[in-house]
Image (spheres, rainbow, N blue to C red):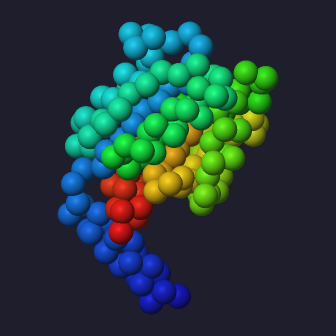
Amino acid sequence: MAAMNNEMHSGKDEHHRKAAEMLPARIAVVTVSDSRTPETDTNGLYLKQQIAESGFQLAAYHIVRDEPAEIDTLIEELVQSDVHIILFNGGTGISRRDTTFDVISRKLEKTMPGFGEIFRILSYEQVGAAAMFSRATAGVYRGKVIISTPGSPAAVQLAWVKLIAPEMQHLAWEITR
């Protein structure tokens, strides 16, 4: 068992080493909101700051209304660009206005179910049973990683610190190799 653990870690370490050799990940930040502006988008401001401080490159920033056609159009524009990863925040709940998950989930060619599962486990520690309402998701569409988190600042920060930032460069490397 110890030998298997060492092999698993050495593979992960090797991937991280190779990922570190590539240029910084290019990231698009998308806030889904009917009311936010660039000045009031606390999640966008937080993510842009974290991206810069982490040495990644902010390639695009958008605020889009929670309208399926607008989200779909923006995804299609972004997958035609040179971004590696598209970070969505907002629109993942279960209310009638929350459509981000529905649009993204229809597009994903490869899903990463572990992202949503782990996010909800971590979120449960903060908000209890309400974590089950989250439809956080991630996957690959047309060679880009798309990650979608709830729009609360606590959820965005949790996802960034615990899941996204530690694997950002690795994710970018995986889709370009």
**How far across and down, in percent of the image, does residue 81 sit?**
37, 43
Q: Please report the residue visible at 24 percent of the width from the left and 36 percent of the height from the top.
A: 53
Residue 64 to residue 121: above or below: above
Q: Is residue 47 visible?
A: no
**Depth check: 122 or 66 in front?**
66
Which of 177/82 is in front?
82
Q: Is residue 106 left or right of residue 142?
A: right
Is any atom of residue 105 visible in this view? Answer: yes
Task: Identify whether 145 is placed above or below 157.
Answer: below
State the count of labels.
0
**Residue 116 location (% of width, % of height):** 63, 49
Picture quadrant of residue 28:
top left
Q: Is residue 23 above or below residue 38?
A: below
State the image quarter where residue 61 is shown.
top left
Q: Position of residue 51 (x, y in %)?
A: 31, 37
Where residue 23 sits in the image (x, y, percent)?
21, 54
| Residue located at (33% from left, 46% from top) | 82
61 or 171: nearer the viewer: 61
Q: Quadrant of the C terminus?
A: bottom left
- Residue under the image location 46 percent in, 57 percent down: 143
Taking 150 as reference, is 40 left or right? left
Q: Which of 53/66 is in front?
A: 66
Image height of 91 relative to 120, above or below = above
Residue at 73%, 21% in the rendered image: 97
